[in-house]
Amino acid sequence: MTVSDAGFLTIGPHSLEYRFVGPRPSEAPTLVLLHEGLGCVGLWGDFPSSLQAATGCGVFAYSRAGYGQSSPVNLPRPLTYMHDEARDVLPALLDQIGFRRGLLIGHSDGASIAAIYAGTHQDHRLGGLVLMAPHFFTEDSGIAAIVEAKEAYETTDLKQKLARWHKDPDNAFKGWNGAWLDPAFRQWDITEPLAYIRVPILIVQGEDDQYGTIAQIEAAERECYCPVEVALMPGVKHSPQRDAPEATLKAIADFVTRTQS
């Protein structure tokens, strides 16, 4: 199919919004952006355009079901929702956009989905992974931050702020927050697939990330057999691309250039 600059893709029962910047997969490598647990196409801001300009690659971003302008999901989300995305949605999406070669660039939940995909699919088209603020297992400090987010959603204007980006903010927030705060989710752990990743990884993480500690990086360094590079950024919290855009862009662009040369 011909993929336009923006629109919707039908994957299974869902209509997923997307944005495509720069050359198409037949012309250059493609960088596929996987957003955070409350993210969407719009919340990437100008990052896709900046990334395209810095690398010359095409940049494809999409909103997972339940986010942005994509169709909603049934709540509560299953606790396997990240595995489900990596198994059922992402392979079909890559095929539908004509993905030929490139990288997955994930943030937070999106980083976890990218890691699951690369650890469970031997996809010869994939040249590397960029994992921003990834989580491979739950931590007490991260759960505490998610509890704080729930309180903010119920007592502040957070819902109104999210409504600027998500057509159904309740679906977006409760789908993410409810899964992470389910007591059974404390057993969630994706360190096993890390050992099966066969492409280089760049981890970009803020030293002050409220949702994950350095233990997440240490898990990747311990479990992965592939090369793992780390860009640990001082004074940065959970969103390196927003807190330190220039340093994050440079780290990613340098990594993309090395893996795609």
Image (cartoon, rainbow, N blue to C red):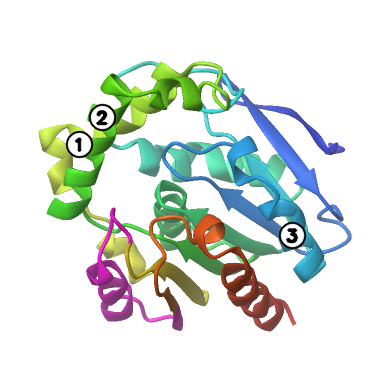
Mark sitting earlier along the chain (2/3): 3
Disc 1 target residue? 147
Q: CA distance from mark 1 to mark 3?
A: 33 Å
In the rendered structure, does residue 228 fall within the stretch colored magenta? yes
- The answer to whether marks 2 and 3 mark residues whose Cβ atoms lie closer than 8 Å is no
Which residue corresponds to the image point at 26% horizontal and 71% vertical from the top-left? 214
Quadrant including the N terminus: top right
Where residue 50 is drawn, which disc sits there? 3
Q: CA distance from mark 2 to mark 3?
A: 32 Å
Where residue 150 is drawn, which disc sits there? 2
Mark sitting earlier along the chain (1/3): 3
Is residue 41 at all visible to an observer of this figure?
no
Residue 44 placement (x, y as % from top left) = 61, 46
Q: Hey, what amino acid is under mark 1? A: Val
Which residue corresponds to the image point at 46% horizontal and 81% vertical from the top-left? 229
- The answer to whether marks 1 and 3 mark residues whose Cβ atoms lie closer than 8 Å is no
Magenta part of the protein: which range? 209-230
- The answer to whether marks 1 and 2 mark residues whose Cβ atoms lie closer than 8 Å is yes
Vertical relation: 24 (above or below) 179: below
